[in-house]
Image: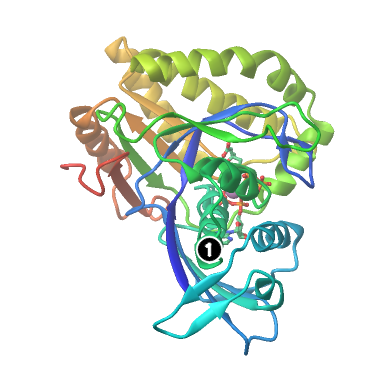
Amino acid sequence: MATGRTPTNIAVIKYWGKRDEALILPVNDSISVTLDPDHLSATTTVAVSPSFPSDRMWLNGKEISLSGGRFQSCLREIRRRAREFEDEKKGIKIKKEDWEKLHVHIASYNNFPTAAGLASSAAGLACLVFTLGKLMNVKEDYGELSSIARQGSGSACRSIYGGFVKWCMGKKDDGSDSIAVQLADETHWNDLVIIIAVVSSKQKETSSTSGMRDSVETSPLLQYRAQTVVPSRVLKMEEAIKNQDFESFAKLTCADSNQFHAVCLDTTPPIFYMNDTSHRIISLVEKWNHSEGTPQVAYTFDAGPNAVLIARNRKTAALLLQKLLYCFPPQDRDLSSYLVGDKSILGDAGL
Ligand code: ADP
Ligand code: DP6
Ligand code: CO
């Protein structure tokens, strides 16, 4: 049995659209920040036993099907790399070829809303690959694990690393160069504080996978975004992260979130991931940033209504939380809770 825990990551330059559905190859590069595991992570335990007749999985206590291609790809790729395992004290020896015949039981829990636009598939599939690899004594490096996680869920390839991470789309048809690389580790830019306003923890109606498939098929804006907008935005974002330039970072982050949601609106039929509360949060931040003359907070929304707010420092984060609590008091049924966390110091936001 092996257990692993993997944090989620939130994209500041979004991945939205595949050029290859089976291998999960994206139409553009993306950049994300990996969050702290205390607040948003998946914890997965994988057990193996000769008495298990088939592979099975439970997510948040409920059995789910493993028949989808993505879970099968991850299981197949990890099994292919499995190595002999021996524990003399316990008298256990599993040969390389035995792993092909042994079945696994997988149990995973997310400590945040699942399928609600907080990238549960990123944490979940990265954790699955990592934990299966641990159980099966896989020795491959993080680059290799990242490319296997990518085949589970695109965004999962970025959760293998902490800090700021870039998923390079790659050029090759076999996907061997479509991997995540760490731009800066978790100690970089420690001033930033991330606040997540959980607008709704309900499961979204349109999964990321089917939403982006519809966008690729029907949105003219998606092609323009991928070819003309994102390449230069990625370069500027890398510079902003390197130089800890919050003004540029915030402008790029907000613009990219808004363009991603514009692509969703440009899809036929249109996809609405944000709701009125999400829009009110955007207005609050935009007005505040405008009145200060320079950005204090960046916002970004994934495929769901929940706001990810990145404050330039702890003082700004405290003010932001005050404003949020004033405008969206906790009894407001529409905004259920706030998760506050430093991107690198676990749970210690000092608020
Ligand atoms: P999200 O915005 O939360 O990433 P997606 O639509 O991309 O939503 O993916 C949700 C799906 O990801 C779930 O229906 C489930 O199949 C998978 N998933 C989520 N959490 C886990 C987990 N911990 N382990 C395995 N798979 C998971
Ligand atoms: C809006 O990685 O969940 O969160 O590859 O089909 O599993 P699949 O989709 P997924 O899409 C994530 C989309 C996003 C933006 C991002 O994380 O870059
Ligand atoms: Co997802």
Relative side of 297 to 155, left or right: left
Is 257 placed above or below 204 here? above
Give the side of residue 36 with respect to residue 123, left or right: left
Residue 308 found in image quarter: top left
- Residue found 54% across the figure and 79% down from its top: 93
Task: Pick the quarter of the image with the C terminus.
Answer: top left
Few, some or many residues within 10 Å of mark 1 (<14, 14–19, 20+):
some
Front residue of this view, candidates 2 and 14: 2
* Residue that numbered label 1 is attached to: 137
86 or 63: nearer the viewer: 86
Position of 65 relative to 227 (above/below): below
Image: 341 above or below 223: below
Q: Which residue lies furthest to the front in this view?
A: 88
Q: Which colour scheme is used?
A: rainbow
Residue 103: x and y, percent?
65, 78
Res 321 → quadrant: top left
| Residue 19: x %, y % from top left | 79, 34
Question: Which secondary structure, mark 1?
Answer: loop
Q: Which residue lies furthest to the top in this view?
A: 293
**Is residue 303 something one can see in this rendering?**
no
> Mark 1 is on which residue type?
Asn
Residue 304 screen position, x and y as percent? 55, 45
Q: Give the quadrant of ligand 2.
A: top right
- Farthest residue, direction bottom: 51
Visible residue check, residue 170: yes
Extreme residue in the right direction: 217
Task: Tell me if 319 is positioned left or right of 214 in this view.
Answer: left
Query: What residue do we see at 55% from left, 19% from top?
Result: 234
x then y, percent, for residue 68: 75, 62
| Ligand 1 closer than 8 Å to label 1 CB | no
Residue placed at 37% from the left, 43% from the top? 196
The image quadrant of residue 94 is: bottom right
